[in-house]
Amino acid sequence: MMDVTAIKRTHLERFKETPRVFTSPGRVNLIGEHTDYAEGFVMPAAIDFSTQAAISCRDDRQVAIYSANFTEQVIHDLDAMPERGSHHWSDYPLGVVHMLRLAGIDVPGFSMSIEGNVPLGAGLSSSASIEVAVALAVLSAAGTTLPPPEVARLCQRAENSYVGASTGIMDQFIACCGAEDHALLLDCRSLSYRLAPIPSNISLVICNTMVKHSHAGGEYNTRRAEVEEGTAILRSHRPEVRVLRDATPEDLERWGHEMPPNVLKRCRHIITDSLRAIATADALEAHDLKKLGELLAAAHASYRDDFEASCPEADIMVDLAVRDPHCYGARLTGGGFGGCTVNLVETSAAEAFSEKIAADYRAATGIQPDIYRCRASAAAHEVL
Ligand code: GAF
C-alpha cells in the first residue's frame, strides 16, 4: 500500500489542517470485458496500486481540491459548482461531489488533497480509484456513510454523466468490494458476487504495453454504440432482450445475419465472455489451471478478433507470455486499445518471468514495458 505520510504532510502544509485519509485501489480484470454494461459477468481483483484522498472540513462554502500528481488546485463555491465535466482531472472528484449532492447528501465546504500511483491510461482503473476515494472522503466530511455497492453506483454515475465516459459498474464495484488475495465474480445485473480465492502459488503479473488509452470518448463509446445496435436488432425479434445479458449464442445464430458484420462480432464477444467469466471462477476455485489458461486464451482471442479492442503490442505481449511454461494464462485486460496484459504466473517463477518478458517485449517492439507484480488487495477504506 502507498505510504500516506506524504499526502498528510502535503495537506497539512497547504490547508493547515490535519486530514482524514481514504484509500481506494486500482483493479485488474481477469476476465469478462465490456460485459458489465450488458449486465453480464466480470471477474476483477483489486490491486495494490491506489489513490489517497485526504480531507478536512472548512468554515466557508468552498471546495478546494489539490492534485499532488498534477500539482494543481481547483477551487469552487458550493453554490456555483460546475454541472458537468470540462476534460480536466478535476472532473472526477467534482463529478462525485455532484452525484453525492444529487443523492441528497449535504456536502459541506472542504479541502482535499489527492495523490495516486495507479498508472494512468493503463487499463488499471485509475479513474474509479479516484472516484471511490473521493466519495468515501466526502461522505466522511458530511458525517455519513453509504453501503459500498451504492457508493459504486454513485461513482459510476459520476463517470457516465459528469465525466462523459459510458463505462459500466465493474471498476467502481471492485474498488468498493474487493478483498485481499481474492478475485470477485460479479453479476452486473443483480450486483450479487462471490469471492474466488487466488491460490498462493499464482501471482498476478501485469505487463504494461505502454500504449495509452482513455475512456472519455473514443473507441470505448463507439463499441458501446455498436453493442446497442446489435441489442436493438435482437430486441426486434425478442422484446425481452433489454441488454445482451438477456440474449443467448442461439439468438445470435438465428438473427446475427441481420447485423452488420462488426456489430455481430461485438455482440458475440460479450455473450461468450460473460459465460467465460463464470467458467473461470469455477476453474479458479477447482484449481484447474489448465482450464483457466484455455479460458483466458479464448477471451484474448475474442477480445482481439471479435471485439477488435486489442492492439499489436498487446498481442505480442500475450504471445510472449504464453510461451513461458510457468504462465498459466494471459490476456489484454481492461477497456482495451492499449494498456496492460494480465498474466497468471507460478509465484516461484514470477520474478524470472517479469525479467524475461520485459526483455523479449523490448526486443520485439523497441518499447520498454513496465511490469508490476501485484497482489489482490482490499477494498477502499479509511487509513487510520
Ligand atoms: C473500463 C470500464 F470502465 C468498465 O466499466 C468495463 O466496461 C471495462 O472497461 C471493460 O471491461 O474499465
Image (cartoon, helix red, strand yellow):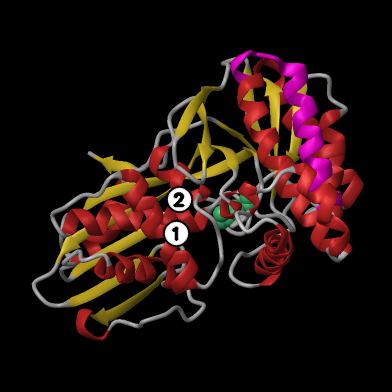
Residue 68 percent across, percent down from the top left: 40, 63
Instruction: Answer few, some or many: residues within 10 Å of disc 2's Cα (few below 14, many 20 plus, some between 14 and 19).
Output: many
Specify whether residue 19 is in view.
no
Residue lying at 71% horizontally and 55% vertically, measured from the top left: 336
Mark 1 beta carbon near ligand 1 (under 8 Å): yes
Residue lying at 42% horizontally and 57% vertically, measured from the top left: 130
Residue located beneath label 2 in the image: 172
Residue found at the very far left of the displayed protein: 59
In this picture, residue 289 sits left or right of residue 65: right
Please identify the quarter of the rendering in which residue 200 is found.
top right
Residue 335 percent across, percent down from the top left: 65, 54
In this picture, residue 152 sits left or right of residue 322: left
Residue 135 percent across, percent down from the top left: 31, 57
The answer to whether the residues at label 2 and label 1 have Cβ atoms under 8 Å apart is yes
Q: Which residues are magenta?
A: 284-306
**Front-lying residue, 73 or 263:** 263
Residue 375 percent across, percent down from the top left: 53, 30
Badge 2 amino acid = Gln
In this picture, residue 325 sits left or right of residue 82: right
Badge 1 amino acid = Gln
Picture quarter with the C terminus? top left
Of label 2 and label 1, which has the lower sequence position? 1
**Front-lying residue, 41 or 144:** 41
Identify the mark at residue 205; answer none if there is no mark: none
Residue located beneath label 1 in the image: 156
